[in-house]
């Protein structure tokens, strides 16, 4: 079910956005508008539906409009034109008190630079949102303790941010965002400042939490590997325009244009592609005739399938089965070569 709806958003930065808006609507692009009016196009006619409970990743090069997009979701900025709603509720028409309550209760935010309060210890940082909501100390510390434990920081409650590594600080950031039990988590380059190994741990941590929490997560990154790993769906922005939205496999197998293709070229396909998108589908009538030594689950990754091909004791092609064990397709050498060479 669609939860966050973004409809035809334009955001123009500069002294007279409305005049530049007319040019944008008439089809001028970011470079032309900058050259002719000095205005910067942040977003150009972006529409997106984000489903409840999905991890939705927004990616694109620096300056493509990622942060501008996420700032429309917490209304840090208002669009020059367009609509934004959460669960059918128009957030652009909220007055200030309603907006403040919306941000406090329904949104959790995790920032690249962690954004921790330096003079508060871990416990008081994580409990901060609940304190703002007016929760009594006992209740907020109980909730905060639970989240501190969940992100693996039990025992560090009394430490201050400057006593923690970057990875630990971001765990505090994540615990703080989750402590108020928000509907939506907004994460702008949340892991980008971390070392590669720590970053990978944090991605795993977030994915593990998400299998239990099913929050609606909007996650911004400029790193395609990160996007492909954690995203249920990925939106790709370029010069403020939405170029493609799709599941990781769709993005890799069917890039919408050269820009997306350039991103996907160096991707490790073994980790992204699954049996179901590599197989040759077969109809119900064929499936009863197919016998194979090897039955591969539909969501098996390509890099887990390849070893079977190297073992000559198995007869090809292999059968691909759905979650009920029914055969839905076959994979032979040609199917694998097609996706590796593409
Ligand atoms: N407050 C602002 N005033 C003027 N121009 C802005 C403002 N905020 C963003 N822009 C412009 O809007 C465009 C999109 O910027 P944005 O910060 O959304 O990019 P981004 O994709 O988040 O980039 P990065 O990966 O570097 O964070 C850029 O051209 C930027 O210069
Ligand atoms: Mg940004």
Image (cartoon, rainbow, N blue to C red):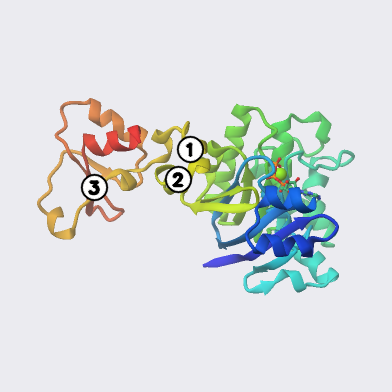
Q: Which mark is residue 255?
A: 2
Q: Does residue 319 sit above or below 1 in this rendering?
A: above
Q: Secondary structure at mark 1?
A: helix
Q: From the image, state whether disc 3 or disc 1 is nearer to you.
A: 1
Image coordinates of residue 313 in percent, x first then y, are 15, 27
Image coordinates of residue 73 in percent, x first then y, are 70, 60
Image coordinates of residue 40 in percent, x first then y, are 75, 51
Q: CA distance from mark 2 to mark 3?
A: 20 Å
Q: Nearer the viewer, residue 22 or 152?
A: 22
Q: Secondary structure at mark 2?
A: loop
User: Which quarter of the rendered picture does the C terminus lie within?
Assistant: top left
Q: Residues within 10 Å of mark 3 (few under 14, many from 20)?
A: some
The residue that appears at 25% across and 46% down in the rendered structure is 320
Tell me which numbered mark, 3 or 1, is placed earlier along the sequence. Answer: 1
Q: Secondary structure at mark 3?
A: strand
Tell me which numbered mark, 2 or 3, is placed earlier along the sequence. Answer: 2
Q: Is residue 55 left or right of residue 147?
A: left
Tell me which numbered mark, 2 or 1, is placed earlier along the sequence. Answer: 2
Residue at numbered disc 1:
264
Contact (CB < 8 A) between labels 2 and 3? no
Given the current orientation, which residue lies at the most extreme left position?
289
The residue that appears at 23% across and 49% down in the rendered structure is 329
Q: CA distance from mark 2 to mark 1?
A: 8 Å
The residue that appears at 32% across and 48% down in the rendered structure is 276
Q: Residues within 10 Å of mark 1 (few under 14, many from 20)?
A: some
């Amino acid at each position: 079910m669609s939860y966050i709806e973004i409809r035809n958003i334009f955001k123009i930065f500069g002294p007279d956005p409305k005049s530049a808006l007319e040019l944008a609507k008439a089809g001028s692009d970011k470079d032309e508008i900058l050259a002719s009016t000095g205005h910067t196009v942040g977003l150009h006619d972006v529409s997106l539906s984000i489903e409840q409970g999905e991890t939705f990743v927004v990616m694109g090069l620096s300056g493509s409009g990622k942060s501008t997009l996420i700032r429309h979701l917490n209304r840090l900025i208002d669009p020059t034109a367009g609509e934004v709603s959460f669960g059918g509720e128009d957030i652009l028409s909220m007055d200030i008190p309603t907006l403040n309550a919306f941000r406090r209760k329904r949104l959790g935010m995790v920032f690249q630079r962690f954004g921790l309060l330096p003079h508060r210890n871990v416990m008081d940082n994580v409990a901060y949102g609940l304190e703002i909501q007016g929760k009594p100390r006992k209740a907020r510390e109980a909730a905060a303790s639970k989240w501190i434990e969940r992100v693996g920081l039990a025992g560090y409650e009394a430490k201050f941010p400057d006593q923690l590594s970057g990875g630990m600080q971001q765990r505090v950031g994540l615990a703080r965002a989750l402590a108020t039990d928000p509907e939506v988590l907004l994460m702008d380059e949340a892991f980008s400042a971390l070392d590669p190994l720590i970053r990978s741990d944090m991605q795993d941590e977030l994915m593990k939490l998400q299998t239990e929490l099913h929050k609606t997560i909007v996650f911004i990154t400029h790193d395609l590997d990160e996007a492909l790993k954690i995203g249920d769906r990925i939106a790709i922005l370029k010069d403020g325009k939405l170029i493609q939205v799709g599941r990781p496999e769709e993005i890799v197998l069917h890039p919408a244009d050269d820009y997306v293709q350039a991103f996907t070229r160096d991707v490790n396909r073994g980790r992204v592609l699954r049996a179901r998108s590599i197989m040759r589908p077969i109809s119900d009538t064929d499936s009863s005739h197919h016998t194979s030594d090897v039955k591969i689950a539909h969501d098996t990754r390509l890099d887990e399938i390849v070893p079977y091909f190297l073992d000559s004791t198995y007869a090809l092609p292999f059968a691909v089965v759905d979650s009920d064990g029914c055969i839905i397709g076959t994979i032979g050498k040609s199917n694998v070569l097609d996706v590796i060479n593409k």
